[in-house]
Image: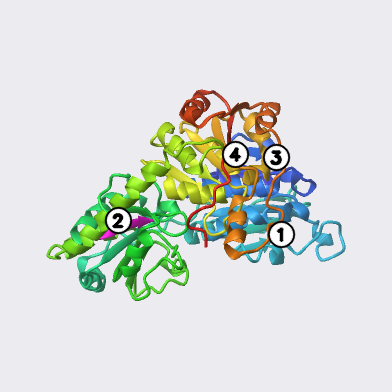
């Protein structure tokens, strides 16, 4: 006896380690939902909007590195997935989107909600296919999954609604095992890299999330090489605050004194990062890049030497190659001076008093109250740059919308993170504009009684846009928000709602929120403060 296409889809995804599928119920996927309801291996997580489903899949993939899946019906449902898939595609998260499609005999006609989904998904899906025969389902799923995982990208399969119930004799199969040669580097292989590094008198290291497993060796390298360490926003938490020669972030929201130092550097090592903050970088430095997917990692960075491999495998060999290197004492002094100057100012900014609360004061309170291994999900906007500027990480994991930079990411990411890692403390740091885009999915957290905390920077405006308009001398339009009472909204959705009434009680309020079982929202009236590094 064969199984239906829908049942084979579920079996195949389960074999690949998929634990849940995020989506919104729709007519063209009811066959898939029926199959999901008949088994217990994969959980269907219904949300309020398809963009949230895609954001949740993107966040899960970023957090775990595994294939994550979202689904939607045809037409508007499929179209609504695109924003979240844009985030996954831009940040190299392995996500598979499954969408319903018109019946086979209606494809290409004026059938309601029909659209050529392969064209629709083309900007964000490295691979997109429409199932034309029930016997091709395993081949398409295996191909899409393999491409997603190997290239860390988005793939998409549309399935005509009538094919879900068709029976097939095809059986699920595992992906082929791929043995990578990232551990087989020899010092001789890195001779060119070592020669470039030895030419440095003012070296710098820029690290991202891809350097997480190599942080200790990078710290040792910075000492031997005499290099300052900068991190992307994704690299927050890779190094502890007290790491010698760590200058924290670069770019808008980073260490305001780091750009001057970075621009002077003559050799830069990019470790597990593809981001290159234009306007903050050296123009004549020789650049080395280490990345596991180097062919997709350059992002227009003028790299001289690239190494395809893992930071934790490559850097120990570079340490050996630099055994006789003499670091510049003058450059080290410059780095330490810059580190000390910013550390002092950062501490002072985090103590600034007043009400509504200064953004840096909120960041400092978050820093003081969260667990050292918490998962932080960050929305996009003014909250992002203040967090990047003032947050001094311990070992926390930070999830955010990197290249796509979409508002509305914070809450969906927190829900997905808690579903995936229920033992972790999960805190979403959001602006009022960002949370308003996904308020309906407060109810998704309620449905699963998720113990998450959402902290709202409530300044009644799209402050980042205000800052940019002011910096450009433009008139402001549409930047002031009409906000609800977030505490009452949260409580109406079954959450615990709290509000800070003074800046002195921030830590107490946040500790209470974190201790509270179930979903909790903290509304913090926030000052409309011009961000000092706005360009």
Alpha carbons under labels 4 and 3: distance apart: 37 Å
Magenta stretch holds residue 468: no
Pick whichever, 111 or 427, lies toward us. 427
Which residue in the protein does label 3 denote?
483
The residue sitting at 28% across, 44% down in the picture is 242
**Does label 1 or label 4 sit earlier along the sequence?**
4
Q: Is residue 392 above or below residue 534?
A: above
Q: Main secondary structure of the magenta part?
A: strand
Residue 473 lies, in percent from the top left, at 62, 64
> Along the polypeptide, which appears first: circle 4 or circle 3?
4
Left or right side of 437 for 217 = left
- Residue situated in front as seen by the camera: 71 or 255: 255
Residue placed under numbered mark 2 in the picture: 338
Up the image or down, 71 lies above or below 452; here it is: below
Residue at the spot 87% in from the left edge and 63% down from the top edge: 110
The local crowd at label 3, few if under 14, some if 14 to 19, many if 20 or more residues have their Cα within 10 Å, is: few
Q: CA distance from mark 2 to mark 3?
A: 40 Å
Q: Left or right of 402: which side holds 255? A: left
Between 356 and 294, the one lying in front of the other is 356
The residue beneath circle 1 is 133
Q: Which residues are magenta?
A: 227-231
Q: Secondary structure at mark 2?
A: helix
CB atoms at circles 2 and 3 under 8 Å apart?
no
Please say whether residue 182 is visible from this viewpoint. yes
Task: Give the secondary structure at mark 1.
Answer: loop
């Amino acid at each position: 006896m064969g199984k239906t296409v829908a049942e084979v889809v579920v079996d195949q995804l389960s074999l690949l380690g998929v634990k849940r599928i995020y989506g919104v119920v729709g007519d063209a996927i009811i066959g898939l939902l029926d199959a999901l309801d008949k088994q217990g291996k994969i959980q269907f997580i219904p949300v309020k909007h398809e963009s949230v489903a895609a954001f949740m899949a993107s966040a899960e993939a970023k957090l775990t590195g595994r294939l994550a899946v979202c689904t939607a019906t045809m037409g508007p449902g499929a179209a609504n997935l695109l924003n979240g898939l844009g985030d996954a595609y831009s940040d190299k998260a392995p996500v598979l989107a499954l969408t319903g499609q018109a019946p086979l005999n209606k494809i290409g006609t004026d059938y309601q909600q029909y659209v050529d989904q392969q064209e629709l998904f083309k900007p964000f899906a490295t691979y997109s296919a429409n199932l034309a025969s029930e016997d091709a389902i395993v081949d398409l799923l295996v191909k899409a999954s393999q491409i997603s995982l190997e290239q860390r990208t988005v793939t998409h399969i549309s399935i005509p609604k009538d094919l879900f119930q068709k029976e097939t004799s095809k059986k699920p199969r595992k992906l082929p095992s791929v043995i990578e040669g990232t551990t087989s580097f020899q010092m001789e292989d890195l001779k060119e890299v070592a020669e470039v590094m030895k030419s440095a008198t003012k070296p710098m290291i820029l690290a991202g999330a891809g350097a997480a497993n190599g942080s200790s060796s990078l710290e040792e390298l910075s000492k031997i090489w005499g290099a300052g360490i900068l991190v992307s926003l994704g690299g927050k938490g890779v190094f502890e605050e007290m790491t010698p020669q760590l200058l924290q972030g670069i770019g808008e929201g980073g260490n305001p004194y780091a750009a001057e130092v970075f621009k002077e550097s003559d050799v830069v090592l990019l470790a597990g990062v593809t981001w290159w903050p234009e306007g903050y970088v050296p123009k004549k430095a020789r650049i080395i890049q280490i990345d596991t997917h180097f062919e997709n990692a350059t992002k227009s960075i003028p790299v001289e030497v690239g190494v395809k491999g893992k930071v934790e495998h490559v850097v120990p060999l570079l340490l050996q190659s630099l055994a006789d290197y003499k670091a510049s004492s003058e450059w080290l002094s410059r780095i330490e001076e810059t580190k000390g100057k910013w550390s002092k100012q950062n501490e002072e900014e985090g103590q600034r008093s007043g009400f509504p609360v200064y953004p840096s004061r909120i960041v400092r309170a978050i820093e003081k109250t969260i667990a050292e291994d918490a998962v932080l999900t960050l929305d996009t906007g003014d909250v992002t740059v203040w967090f990047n500027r003032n947050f001094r990480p311990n070992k926390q994991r930070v999830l955010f919308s990197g290249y796509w930079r979409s508002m509305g990411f914070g809450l969906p990411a927190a829900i997905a993170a808690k579903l995936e890692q229920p033992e972790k403390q999960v805190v979403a740091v959001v602006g009022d504009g960002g949370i308003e885009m996904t308020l309906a999915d407060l109810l998704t957290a309620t449905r699963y009684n998720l113990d998450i905390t959402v902290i709202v920077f409530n300044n009644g405006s799209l402050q980042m846009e205000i800052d940019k308009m002011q910096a450009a001398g433009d008139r402001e339009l549409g930047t002031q928000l009409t906000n609800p009472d977030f505490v009452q909204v949260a409580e109406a959705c079954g959450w615990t709602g709290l509000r800070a009434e003074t800046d002195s009680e921030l830590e107490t309020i946040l500790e209470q929120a974190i201790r509270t079982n179930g979903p909790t929202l903290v509304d913090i009236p926030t000052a409309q403060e011009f961000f000092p590094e706005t360009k």
